[in-house]
Amino acid sequence: MNLNMVFRSLGPIDIRSVSRDSLVSWMIYIPIFMALLMRWGVPPLTARLLEEYNFDLVPYYPVLLAYFFIGMCPMIFGALIGFILLDEKDDRTLTALQVTPLPLNGYILYRVTVPILLTFGLMFVLFPLANLTPFNLRTVLLSAIAAAPMAPMLALIFGSVAQNKVQGFALMKLTGFIFIAPVVAYFTPAGWELAFGIVPTYWPMKVYWLLDEGAANVWLYVVVAVVYQLLVTAFFARKFYKVLHQ
């Protein structure tokens, strides 16, 4: 069974599952809501801060955009797919899946591919929708490539570590630090920020900041971001595979 057949088999089931689950269905709209909030809320806030406190927020727009789009967007889709995995564990759907013609490797590949495609595609919607900085195709493209693997990485962390959806929500809160760490790194003196490189989410955000600054040799950071996240994803994919056979 090829990946196209897996998409056609599981895609409609996932859509129905998400639409029926009020706990996770609202998560899909968070990135769009944040983009609209930035579009209409940040410019007036910037003007007010400049007028009353002589503080210019514009230089920090890249921090906001990286946190909410490069970081939070993959987290949303990673958590969404992760909760689907948890539901399927609770319902023993994954156990039943092992006696169907659908190969387990094909199923995992599908679960990895979906959040990558959703994250990658939405990047080209969020940045122009927020309209805080001029749209730059190269910046968005390379940032999307660097950020997309984060979604399946988080999905498999959820699926292999949490036992149920309640634990999944707790895990989502606990993993919040991996999105704060790169923001802290942004304000860290040069030379020290690489210490945050142990956190996988640092690299995609760093890619966006370098591109925004017009830095050269950004491809090296893109490669590190993708490879590092894929290695973490592979680790948790093996862990999830073992969970399925317990």
Image (cartoon, rainbow, N blue to C red):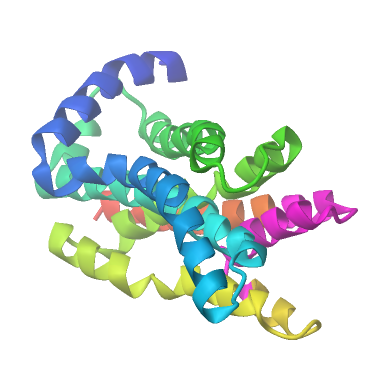
- The quadrant the C terminus occupies is bottom left
Q: Which residue lies furthest to the right in this view?
A: 216
Location of residue 62 in the rendering, given as x and y in whole percent from the top left corner: 63, 59
Indicate whether residue 204 is drawn in magenta.
yes
Residue shown at the point (19%, 66%) measured from the top left: 167
137 left or right of 236?
right
Indicate whether 94 appears above or below 49: above
60 left or right of 27?
right
Splitting the image into 4 quarters, where does residue 36 fall?
top left
Splitting the image into 4 quarters, where does residue 136 fall?
top right
Q: Is residue 226 visible?
A: yes
Indicate whether residue 22 is drawn in magenta.
no
Front residue of 158/59: it is: 59
Location of residue 150 in the rendering, given as x and y in whole percent from the top left corner: 51, 52
Q: Give the range drawn in magenta.
A: 198-224
Location of residue 78 in the rendering, given as x and y in whole percent from the top left corner: 38, 49
